[in-house]
Image (spheres, grey):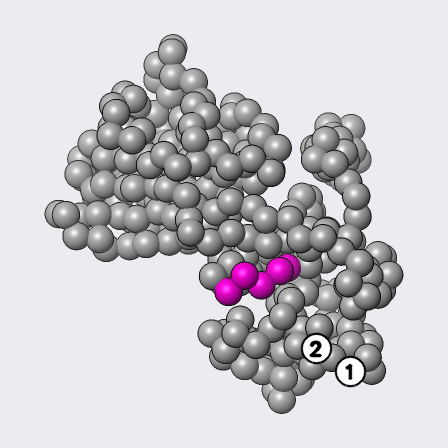
Amino acid sequence: MRNIGLVVNLGKQEVAPLVEQIIDWLTARGCRVVMAHDTASALGHPEMGLPREQLVQIAEVMLVLGGDGTLLRCAREAAPRGIPLLGINFGHLGFLTEIDAPELWPGLEKLLAGRYSVEERMMLEARVLRGGQMVQQVTGLNDAVITKGAFARLIFLETYVDEQLVTTYPADGLIVATPTGSTAYSLSAGGPLVTPELDLMVVTPICPHSLWARPLVIKATSQVKVIIRSKLGEVMLTVDGQQGYKLEFNDMVLIRQSAHRARLIRLKKRSFFYLLRQKLSEGERLNDF
């Protein structure tokens, strides 16, 4: 392992000094460190900068310094090339990241020694069709969400699974989540927790105005089709809470399993249930405020 990419959330003030140490540490061990042009320039290392499309072609592994949001963004770029990601947490929750800053140096030793495993995670692809023509296509690791805008009115979402009508939801929105995304927005909307090694999708209505509407668990090979039946108000498609696209009346959103998979480096033997206790424990979360 000689070409190592760095993805850095520069909004975290404590990150920059640590990046300098990481560069020195890796360079001393014969590794080439590469970054996107904007990151490299901001950190004073323009010689390490590459265009993003070239970065994901050269890097054998990505070190992601930030929180879950930074890792989600990197996963979308790295997945088509099969590049594994090591998440180093500088965020609040850090559910997807593998280590915290104090664990960095022993973690990097394990990485270079090959003492790690790679966990693959299912991803989603969402396409927007307007008048029969595809106008947008996006990929995400957590979820694809169709939701209303700022006004407090219901939207109507005609929803199918494998061309079989489920219902027309009168709701604030609809979430289609992967197992990874089951611990994110879907959880807040009442969806089930799903262990990450499974391949499936969770369809969770947001505040449905219907007594029977409950989350659905469907197979990974299914396709969810949602037709926007609301003429009034703003309706948006968002993927991983980071990519947004405005929808119009009669737009069709098709959501299915992506051909690509996120690859996350694991240095520890921690179960999914251990992470739930550590990251989503009410007592520990209260101590953060």
* Left or right: 148 as drawn, with respect to 242: left
* Closest to the observer, 212 or 195: 195
In the image, residue 60 lies in the stretch drawn in magenta: no
Residue 2: image tag: 2
Please identify the residue farthest to the left as the structure is shown: 131
Q: Quadrant for the N terminus, please.
A: bottom right
Q: Secondary structure at mark 2?
A: loop
In the image, residue 84 lies in the stretch drawn in magenta: yes
**Residue at the image point whose x is 64% and y is 66% from the top:** 62
**Residue at the image point whose x is 17% and y is 52% from the top:** 133
Q: Residues within 10 Å of mark 1 (few under 14, many from 20)?
A: few
Residue 30: image tag: 1
Residue 262: image tag: none
Residue 231: name its quadrant. Answer: top left
Magenta span of residues? 81-85
Question: For the residue marked with disc 1, what is the amino acid?
Answer: Gly
Query: Which tag, 1 or 2, sits closer to the chain's start?
Result: 2
* Left or right: 48 as drawn, with respect to 242: right
Picture coordinates of residue 84, whole percent (x, y): 62, 60
* Left or right: 7 as drawn, with respect to 276: left
Question: For the residue marked with disc 2, what is the amino acid?
Answer: Arg
CA separation in Å, label 1 and label 2: 7 Å
* Closest to the observer, 113 or 93: 113
